[in-house]
Image (spheres, coloured by chain):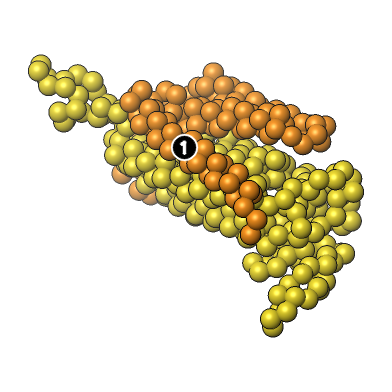
Amino acid sequence: MSDTSATVTAPGRSVWDGGVSPLGASYGKLMMWFFLLSDAFTFSGLLITYGLIRSSHDAYAGAVSDFTFSTEYWPIPEKVFEAVPFLHGVELPLVFVGIMTFILIMSSVTMVLAVEAGHRMDRKAVEKWMLWTLLGGITFLSCQAWEWTHFIVGTDTPTLVKDFVNGEWITKEVVGASLTINQYGPTDFADFFFFITGFHGFHVFSGVLLNFLIYYNTVTGVYERRGHYEMVEKVGLYWHFVDLVWVFVFTFFYLV
Amino acid sequence: MTHSEEPQVTVLPPDKEKIKKLWTVAGILGALTLVEFVIAFTMGHGTLKTAIFVVMTIVKAAYIVGEFMHLRYEVKVLMWAILIPMVFVVWMLVAFVYEGMKFSEINF
């Protein structure tokens, strides 16, 4: 429990000799922190590898306004991600990703407000803020589903891509993207898109499930009977971490 | 009804100051993201632009981890137990960027 952080120790014994929590946090909360640390390494691995592979490809050298898709160089992200739902054919670079970033930050705020309400044993407020957090998470996932669909289906104009078929090089028109070929640039570009945003999206999905569990337990009064809302805090840590990762994905995948 | 079996719970009033602070942090995060957007479309590509983005991302990360995840207010040992292992990420970055530069020197 969170109130075991007493620092009073018997004479001649240090805080590390047992009986007290030297880190001032419960076992569950500590383990969540160390899990998140390991998860941070996983995402660092993905993003740094993205940097490595990107820097080993040629960068686009011409003016940004003349940019066209080609497998010869790494695409400029703002030229790939410029579509917004219901606005077909309108070029709005990174606007949709910006909206998604905003949604995730907002759901992080509502989560921390739920944690604050939990400290005050305010069940109604926890329910309210958990519902907003759930809504934010589900909206983000829906946005990502649209983004993936758009990325896979592709744009109106195909790109000429060289492909190795039956032992010889052929040039063919490609629309959209798969793990083996895509219209935006080198194969690795789409692969990293699928892996990085997919792995993050899966974290969001797990987060929504955990948030729902917390919401359910709050509504049924589990935490009220337990006497504390520490589970909201633990899942809150995970949810903020998902937001944290998106901040990095947004910068290193979409902006740079 | 089973209300009599429910434990007595004292609900404390909202901590206005704390809530205000949380919204301030949210405002800062939103503002930083907006500034990133402006920079993305007004500055030419280059090392300086990337450096600005990296610094702003780390500032945003510090706010999320420090305020939202409450790490700033935890026991110092816990804070450093989480932050010091990040050295490995820095090392990985250095090693991979170095490898990446060697990659581009080799013509496959």
- Identify the residue at image location x=24%, y=23%: A6
> Chain coloured orange: which letter?
B
Q: Is residue A122 visible?
A: no
> Chain coloured yellow: which letter?
A
Q: Is residue B97 visible?
A: yes
User: Which corner quadrant holds the C terminus of chain A?
Assistant: top right
Would you name the residue on which mark 1 appears?
B91
Q: Is residue A120 left or right of residue A74?
A: left
- Identify the residue at image location x=47%, y=49%: A42
User: Farthest residue in the bottom direction?
Assistant: A166
Query: SS at mark 1?
Result: helix
Q: Is residue A167 left or right of residue A34?
A: right
- Identify the residue at image location x=15%, y=28%: A17
Q: Position of residue B65 (x, y in %)?
A: 50, 31
Image quadrant of residue B23?
Answer: top right
Which chain is disc 1 placed on?
B
Other residues around mark 1 within 10 Å, as few (<14) / some (14–19) / many (≥20): few
Residue situated in front as seen by the camera: B50 or A82? B50
Q: Position of residue B19 (x, y in %)?
A: 55, 25
Q: Amino acid at mark 1?
A: Trp
Image quadrant of residue B10?
Answer: top left
Residue situated in front as seen by the camera: A236 or A47? A47
Q: Is residue A216 left or right of residue A194?
A: left
